Image (spheres, rainbow, N blue to C red):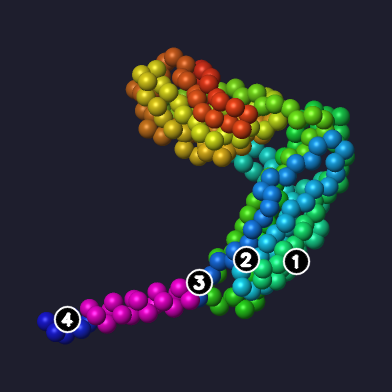
């Protein structure tokens, strides 16, 4: 019994020592970015944000502008030459900050002037050579950049319930307006009064001229509504209250 207890104690001690060592080796850089949303309007071609290093050691940061698109109902990004940042890579001392300027290189075309353009600015921490032997968690922050030529437009959201007798049910929204919509909450109420919170819709953007899709969990073939369902929630443009007709999944 004593040997068994001693072995158990040594095993627990070894685990605690291992966790302690891992805790000393693991690290995650801490930096802050302000503001967290960038906009350019009209003739404005330059904006900026600030990166602050909250670590007790220097942090190297890389900045990359990306074109932000929504295809097949999901977010996607691609490289772009329309936006430039300066500096694209830099090192920030502990407690110090770095101003990053963002330039719109391409002028808004007549086709673009009536619709907001969407980009993402990726801000990545680059681990230093001395961190290669440790368990290191590099931090990435992604902030949106919206560019529009004239006055700020408005979103126009069109909702549909896309169903398949042999497959899942999807909630679809198409933004036919000329400005993005940012969702805060989203709930679907079926014809029996059951409320289904849409997972993944919180803080989701619907870009102009784009579609977003969410799979509705818990819907079965018998539970699928025959009549239109009600979509309700809150967006940055105001409250959402709309009917979503049922259409076949395409």
Specify the quadrant of the image occupied by residue 167: top left
Residue range of the region highlighted in magenta in the rendering: 8-24
Residue picked out by circle 2: 54
Tag shown at residue 4: 4
Residue 86 in magenta? no
Q: How far apart are marks 2 and 4 (CA)?
A: 47 Å
Pointer 3 or 4: first along the chain? 4
The residue at which mark 3 appears reads as 26
Please provide percent x and percent y for residue 137: 55, 65
Q: Which of 220 and 101 is in front in this view?
A: 101
Res 133 → quadrant: bottom right
Residue at horizontal 79 percent and vertical 29 percent from the top = 151
Mark 2 vs mark 4: give the one in front: 2
Q: Do the residues labelled 4 and 1 touch (CB within 8 Å)?
A: no
Do labels 2 and 4 touch, CB within 8 Å? no
Up the image or down, 148 lies above or below 37; here it is: above
Q: Which residue is drawn at 16% across and 85% down?
A: 3
Q: Which of marks 4 and 1 is nearer the N terminus?
A: 4
Q: What element carries label 1?
A: strand
Dot placed on the residue nearer the N-terminal end, 2 or 1: 2
Which mark, by number, is residue 90? 1
The C terminus lies in quadrant = top right
Q: Which residue is drawn at 61% across and 69% down?
A: 55
């Amino acid at each position: 019994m004593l040997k068994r207890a001693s072995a158990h104690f040594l095993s627990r001690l070894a685990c605690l020592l291992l966790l302690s060592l891992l805790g000393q080796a693991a690290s995650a850089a801490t930096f802050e970015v302000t503001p967290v949303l960038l906009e350019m309007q009209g003739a404005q071609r330059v904006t900026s944000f600030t990166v602050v290093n909250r670590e007790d050691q220097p942090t190297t940061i890389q900045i990359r502008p990306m074109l932000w698109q929504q295809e097949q109902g999901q977010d996607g990004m691609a490289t772009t030459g329309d936006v430039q940042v300066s500096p694209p890579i830099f090192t920030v001392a502990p407690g110090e900050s770095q101003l990053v300027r963002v330039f719109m290189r391409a002028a808004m075309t007549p086709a673009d002037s009536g619709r907001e353009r969407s980009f993402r600015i990726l801000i990545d921490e680059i681990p230093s050579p001395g961190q290669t032997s440790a368990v290191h968690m590099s931090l990435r922050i992604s902030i949106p950049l919206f560019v529009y030529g004239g006055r700020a437009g408005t979103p126009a959201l069109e909702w549909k319930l896309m169903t398949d007798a042999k497959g899942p049910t999807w909630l679809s929204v198409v933004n036919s307006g000329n400005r993005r919509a940012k969702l805060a909450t989203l709930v679907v109420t079926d014809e029996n009064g059951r409320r289904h919170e849409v997972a993944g819709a919180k803080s989701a953007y619907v870009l102009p001229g784009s579609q977003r899709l969410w799979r509705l969990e818990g819907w079965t073939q018998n539970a699928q509504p025959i009549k239109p369902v009600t979509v309700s929630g809150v967006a940055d443009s105001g409250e959402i209250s709309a009917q979503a007709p049922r259409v076949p999944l395409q």
